[in-house]
Amino acid sequence: MKPQPSPQPAAPGVVRFYNFLPPGNNFLEEVLTGLARPQKSIPPKYFYDEQGCRLFEAICELPEYYLTRTETAILRTHIAEIAQFIGPDAQLIEFGSGAQAKTRVLIEALQTLLYVPVDIAEDTLRASSGKLASLFPLLNVVGICADYTRALWLPELAGVPIRKKAVFFPGSTIGNFTPAEALVFLKQARRAAGAGGVLLVGVDLKKDKTTLDAAYADSKGVTAQFNLNLLARINRELGADFQPSRFRHQAFYDPIMGRVEMHLESLGPRAAVQRARNGCRLASCQSRGSGRGRPLTWID
């Protein structure tokens, strides 16, 4: 089924934005809570400040990072079948929309008139959605700045013919959840799709350890910068005094747990003593996907 040219409605699309993030940022509370755990952790959403978003997009272009180009190729190869499965007049909802590169393939094939991207990084959300709107001037975009892992209300746009809703969740981001968290998310996605809706999820399969290790410890050190940037953000926004130069990036695939772990290990003569006392090793455990990964950030 070859996609046909988009119809020409009477009026151009509109672009609207809603910010559903809590007024008082929970960053400090969640960092302190995470650091107090025996297996220390920080929610993965905090990787994505402005610099973190730029670094992640650079990661997606690395030769070692196969996920982006592989998923994009799969999407392009099977776009006709996907479009047929979803059907016409579908509202497209994307969780963790990021740069929205793969989304363009879907919008063109589905002839989508209403797109609802959801992302926690407001600047990236606005820039990407504005660019998308310029490419598809008849597309209605309702951008939602929010944490999609929490219960979320999605506004409706009157006047746009919609037969069903399609939730798009690419990048193997589903692999960043624990089984219990994944179940909660899928239930929320089902509610967002509504009766008769569909869910399109990109899932990476387990690979050999060499391939996975290389994907998260690239030769250019971009992933290391991405991981270390979390410390810089904590310092800048919370007034902490982490010294990123005293940490090193370590990433590896744990075949027993079936996950990739990204660690920031402290350096210097006191590091071994500190780790022996309270396990002070900043780490992030993740299975980042090709779209906009949401790695679990661990401090162990």
Image (cartoon, grey):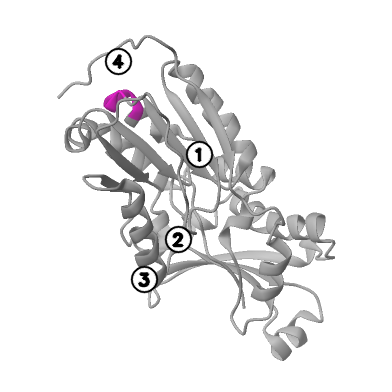
Q: Residue furthest left?
A: 1
Give me the residue at 31% from left, 36% from top: 73
Earlier in the chain: of badge 2 and badge 3, it is: 3
Give the CA separation, mark 3 to mark 1.
29 Å
Is residue 270 in view from this perspective?
Answer: yes
Residue 237 position in % (x across, y down): 79, 55
Q: Is residue 18 magenta?
A: no
At which x and y percent is residue 249? 64, 63
Alpha carbon separation for disc pair 1 and 4: 30 Å
Q: Is residue 269 above or below residue 159?
A: below
Amino acid under disc 3: Pro
Region rendered in magenta: 107-111
Q: Which mark is residue 179?
A: 3
Residue at numbered disc 1: 61
Residue 281 visible to the viewer: no
The residue mark sitting in front, 3 or 1, is 3
Say which residue label 2 marks.
Answer: 287
